[in-house]
Image: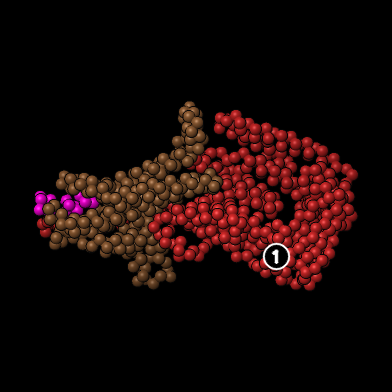
Amino acid sequence: MSVTARRSLLALLVPLFAVVVWLQVQLDPMRKRYQPGKVTNIEIGTQFVAATLIGLKEVVAGLLWVRADEFFHSGNYAAVIPIVRIVTWLDPHQIDVYDTGAWHLSYNFTDSQERSDRRYIPPAQALYSEGIANNPDIYDLYFAQGWMNFHKVLDFKKAIELFTEANRRPAVDPATGRRRMRPQFVGHTLAHAYRKDGQIDRAIEQWRQNIRDNERYVRESGDPGEQVMVDVARNNLNQLLREKEERSRLKPLKDAKFEAQWQFLGPRKFRVFGTLDLPTGARVRLVLRDKDFKEQQFQKFSWDIDTNQTILIDDLYVKDGRFSRTIDIERDVTIYPLKAEEYVMTFTFNPLTAPDFVQDVIGFKGEGLADQKYLVVRNGVRMLEKSFIIKRNQLL
Amino acid sequence: MTAWVIARNTFGEAIRKKILNVFLILALGSVLISLTFTFLEFRQQVVILKSFGLGMVQFWGLFIAIIMGISLIPADIEQRTIYTILSKPVKRYEYVLGRFLGGAITLAVNVALMGAAFLVVFLLKVNTRALESLASLDFGAFWTSWVWSGEVPGLIGGIAMVYMKLLLLLAVAVCFSTFATVTVNFFLSSAVFIAGSISSVTEAMSKSPNTPIVLRWLYAAVHYLVPNFGNYDVQNPIIHPEVPAADLPLYMWKAVFYGLAYTIILLVVGVLVFERKEV
């Protein structure tokens, strides 16, 4: 090679490097959009960092999730949550992982009598919120968090808020990757949530909207089988209109003759019992909590709960006007540490959460409910409530 | 023209190498394994199939690129065939260029085969109903239930990004092979690959106020001067098409130009070194 050619090649390197650096400056801000890790807080183990370094984040995430599935099927739920944390860090668009993780937290950590550990509800909410922040444009996680609030937490207002967001967003077909209409059950569940919250007129309005949406779904999908959802929405609307009409005439008021007591049976063991003159199948909610209990707030997801807190929630089945249950938490010291000096034990009957056949007697919001001792009205809902203040030594 | 002849010979030699064929078979097997995760939800299966498929094309492609790249020139020196080649009217730059082009073609064929296998597996996976129809020899139902996934162009884009990454790695290995032995080259190329793959870290450190100023410069130098393999990690929006990925095609084109420019730099350096090498 001649000296001139050599010098020319050397000179060529300078503009080429300039081009490379210029392109890198252009690529840097764009790259962040396509490489995940936006909303997480995690200290990740170095063993996972290696794979992520060479661009195999998603592969590791997938394989870890397969492993998590094995843990789940072997009943080792506690092992699943750290994997959820790692997988969502590696790939924050794995919506099923957020959903499954939050479900584990809110449902599957249970005591020896199958009551879930309520201290994990705030972490579950935080995990859902993180998932939504990372995946804000599709309906899935709004719906999933709404369902947890609807079914587990019984916070119907929050459920409505989330179902409404879900009902504004599309779904994605996993086979084709194309956007499509969200499933019809999203709008249906929103209507159910309005009804559960006692917002009957909004529920009726939503069922009418659901009928229109479902008819459009049938037209656009071209699948006549989808007509069944139109029929379901019509039936639900008609039933709700009928119930509204019937329940507007609840006279005279039904005296529930509510009474509740508790009895110490031994250390960490007590019986709760009482009367409620409503149809068999009604439920009384028992809450035992620290007197100064405050639900933990998580700005970002963590499963590091305050293990000094105690909160126990159970639903007591009413049969022939009576309810009774023995609460034995002797083997559940970690879930119910009983470290506070004082506790509040509350028995509540809330018409909003009552089954249909009970609401037939007392109305959607307790309009037909009466009680001589324990009737309270909260946010327009007539409910029954009795509380006890209990000292720690009364439980131990 | 001479370079093209050398490239064709290089390709012919490469496809006869058993080790590269073994990697290719392993890659195809790895893609097929992802079909077995049927115990997960369908959506999760599809996500894992895509991430696993793209990941395996890259993973085995890395082995193919590096093993091939480090041995392209040293093998000729060790076997002394380099004397025969250079005694003919072949310029040294033509030789280096020909070797690289042959490697690039081999890499392209391997990635194309792995990518095609992945795409076939993906389309079969998302067409469960169509496959059932085919199994029952109902060809009419097969065609009507077949879904042409809108994700295929994105997946092809993802495979193309993997190829660009591997091409850049091949250029690094070929550049080093003009002066380093196979073993030294293996570690050198691997080190450059790792340093160039942590672009998000080097970029963050070069801008962090907590990093001492000298180290900031060092990180900036690594970030801008070492080939940036992290530029090609765009699998996530391809695996999750529901996530908006504005300007992704533009980004991919820029990354392609970046890769081509850097490949030229590495080849020029390789040629300059090889011109002065005593063989």
Residue B95 within the segment the image draws in magenta? yes
Q: Residue at x 66, y 48 (%)?
A: A160
Q: Quadrant of residue B67?
A: bottom left
| Residue type (three-letter) at the residue carrying disc 1 | Asp
Figure colour scheme:
by chain
Whether residue A107 is visible, yes or no, is yes
Q: Which chain is depicted brown?
A: B
**Would you say residue A221 sits in the magenta stretch?**
no
The residue carrying mark 1 is A332
**Tint of chain A:** red
Q: Position of residue A240 (x, y in %)?
A: 75, 38
Q: Main secondary structure of the magenta part?
A: helix
| A60 sits to left or right of A295 | left
Residue extent of the magenta highlight: B86-100
Q: Secondary structure at mark 1?
A: loop
Q: Residue at x 60, y 58 (%)?
A: A77
For mark 1, name the chain.
A
- Residue A112: x and y in percent read 70, 60
Q: Residue at x 70, y 43 (%)?
A: A192
Judge whether A216 appears above or below A269 on screen. Answer: above
User: As rendered, which of B92 and A79 lies closer to the eye?
Assistant: A79
